[in-house]
Image (tube, rainbow, N blue to C red):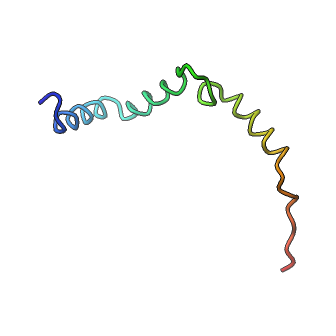
Amino acid sequence: MAGTVAGGKKAAAKNLARDPLFYAKIGAKGGRLGRTGGFAANPELARIAGRKGGTISRRGKAKKIAA
């Protein structure tokens, strides 16, 4: 059954039975170990970039609406 849709579903079920977070862990590893860097590899960089974007935003101050 190797290489078929049914075989893939059976393997996925077995992986999830062993570890419910199997695919989440694989995805996290891929994000951290990517060679292109980016925010997944460096959460602190994401925080700094978000702060910069927020401080230079062109959006004005929040206005209070009279009820």
**Looking at the rendering, which quadrant does residue 21 occupy?**
top left
Q: Position of residue 4 (x, y in %)?
A: 16, 34
Q: Position of residue 16 (x, y in %)?
A: 31, 34
Task: Report whether 33 appears left or right of 46.
Answer: left
Locate the N terminus by quadrant.
top left
Q: How many marks?
A: 0
Q: Residue at x 23, y 31 (%)?
A: 11
Query: Of residues 22 and 43, which is closer to you in this image?
Result: 43
Q: Residue at x 69, y 33 (%)?
A: 46
Indicate whether 64 appears above or below 38. below
Q: Residue at x 45, y 30 (%)?
A: 27
Task: Report whether 33 appears left or right of 21.
Answer: right
Task: Report whether 23 appears left or right of 34.
Answer: left
Q: Residue at x 71, y 28 (%)?
A: 44
**Looking at the rendering, which quadrant does residue 47 occupy?**
top right
The outermost residue toward the bottom is 67
The outermost residue toward the left is 1
Q: Position of residue 12 (x, y in %)?
A: 27, 34
Query: Of residues 10 and 39, which is closer to you in this image?
Result: 39
Task: Report whether 15 appears left or right of 53.
Answer: left
Locate the C terminus by quadrant.
bottom right
